[in-house]
Image: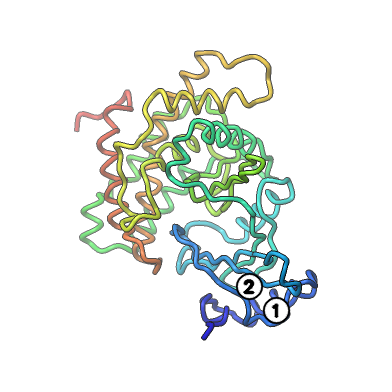
């Protein structure tokens, strides 16, 4: 016996979701009207929301099903970002050809266009050809001009998260993660990297599950903009490098293997591809490459703090099956391990 879409997809407002689907049915015209005939497949690897692929049979049985994506917002994750701002970003990015189209919203989630492309795997990130495509796409993504100011958000966002983490977590975790001192670390790091940084519209969560490739055209699409904001481009590249140590589709998706962090040759290749994709005929200068390499490594520390704090908060507010606290332990451990190697100023205490 088939299970209906509204039983498989947990939604705070199934009636609103139904209205969206009925409206799409009328708009498309070629799909069957029985909503119970829709096939729903949960998508693995999401850690902020629950994501479902919906296959919608057409009236002509010889035609391929229409597909769409239903995203159900994770419980409590609105502490991380303003959902209305994210939707505005989503629509703006889609209008400029960088991502899927928004098909509808309902309380607790949204319906998106399904992109007929393959989500990258962790091994794809190490493929030089695919990595070059990602680097080029990221350069174009950074050039998107979102209406409004271009203020860097990473530092104030982390300071806000420190306060939220301290309010939520147990005394045990407060002590374990040294949360009373983390804001000092954020201030120190901001001061250390605060030079003439190139600012761009950054994705801030460029893990392999947020990158898709059309294998017929090799077109890359970057999806999911919950954490997107203006930031130094070096931070976005650093975060992408840090994501190469993760396997979110394993039996232990929270475990990170830092032996997989890209070496200097691989990092240099990505950055050269990134800088070369500007459209200018002239090759990037060696000092430009070296500077971005150095900045990127320093910003890995910001990535560790950012996602370490995210994990602590998520461990208390999000019900998705993922060991957020253990994930945070690994990010903080890596921060303390790498800090004396990367920062020129390192307090003796």
> Measuring 22% from the left and 61% from the top, which residue is drawn there?
171
Decide: is 20 above or below 264: below
Q: Residue at x 39, y 69 (%)?
A: 319
Corner quadrant of residue 326 = bottom left
Residue farthest to the bottom? 1
Whether 96 is drawn above or below 265: the answer is below
Q: Mark 1 or mark 2, which is nearer the start of the sequence?
A: 1
Real-space CA distance between mark 2 and mark 1, rounded to the nearest whole angstrom: 9 Å
Label annotation for residue 106: 2
Q: Please tell me the numbered disc located at residue 294.
A: none
Please tell me the numbered disc located at residue 19: 1
SS class of the residue under badge 1?
Answer: helix
Q: Is residue 70 above or below residue 252?
A: below
| Farthest-out residue, front | 62
Residues at circles 2 and 1 in contact by the CB criterion of under 8 Å: yes
Q: How is the image coloured?
A: rainbow
x and y, in percent, of residue 208 in the image: 48, 46
Q: In this figure, what is the number of numbered marks? A: 2
Left or right: residue 166 versus residue 216 is: left
The x and y percentages for residue 124 are 47, 41
- Which secondary structure, mark 2? strand
**Residue 141, percent across and down?**
62, 39
Q: Name the spot of residue 143 as percent of width and height, x first.
A: 65, 35
Q: Within the image, what quadrant is residue 188 found in?
A: top left
Q: Report the residue at 43% width, 59% height from top.
A: 47
At a point 47% along the width and 36% down the height, the residue shown is: 235
Crowd around label 2: few <14 · some 14–19 · many ≥20 (10 Å):
some
Query: Which of these two is toward me, 346 or 88?
Result: 88
């Amino acid at each position: 016996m088939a299970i209906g879409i509204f039983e498989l997809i947990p939604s705070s407002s199934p009636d609103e979701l139904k209205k969206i689907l009925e409206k799409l049915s009328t708009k498309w015209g070629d799909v069957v009207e029985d909503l119970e005939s829709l096939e729903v497949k949960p998508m693995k690897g999401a850690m902020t929301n629950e994501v479902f692929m919906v296959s919608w049979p057409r009236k002509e049985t010889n035609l391929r099903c229409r597909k769409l994506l239903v995203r159900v917002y994770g419980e409590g994750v609105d502490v991380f970002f303003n959902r209305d701002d994210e939707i505005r970003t989503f629509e703006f990015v889609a209008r400029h050809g960088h991502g899927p189209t928004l098909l509808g919203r309902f309380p607790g989630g949204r319906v998106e266009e399904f992109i007929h492309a393959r989500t990258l795997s962790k091994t794809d990130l190490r493929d030089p050809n695919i990595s070059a495509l990602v680097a080029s796409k990221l350069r174009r993504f950074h050039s998107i001009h979102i209406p409004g100011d271009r203020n860097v958000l990473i530092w104030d966002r982390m300071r806000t998260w420190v306060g939220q983490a301290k309010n939520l977590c147990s005394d045990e975790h407060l002590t374990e993660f040294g949360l009373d001192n983390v804001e000092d670390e954020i201030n120190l790091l901001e001061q250390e990297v605060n030079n003439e940084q190139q600012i761009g519209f950054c994705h801030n969560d460029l893990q392999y599950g947020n990158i898709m490739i059309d294998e017929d055209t090799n077109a890359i699409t970057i999806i999911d903009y919950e954490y997107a904001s203006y930031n130094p481009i070096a931070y976005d590249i650093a975060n992408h490098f840090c994501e190469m140590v993760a396997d979110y589709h394993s039996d232990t998706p929270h475990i990170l293997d830092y032996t997989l962090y890209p070496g200097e040759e691989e990092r240099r290749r990505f950055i050269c591809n990134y800088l070369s994709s500007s459209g200018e005929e002239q090759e990037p200068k060696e000092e430009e490459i070296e500077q971005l390499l150095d900045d990127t490594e320093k910003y890995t520390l910001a990535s560790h703090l950012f996602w370490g704090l995210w994990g602590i908060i998520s461990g208390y507010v999000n019900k998705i099956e993922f060991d957020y606290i253990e994930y945070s332990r690994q990010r903080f451990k890596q921060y303390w391990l790498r800090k004396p190697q990367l920062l020129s100023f390192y307090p003796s205490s």
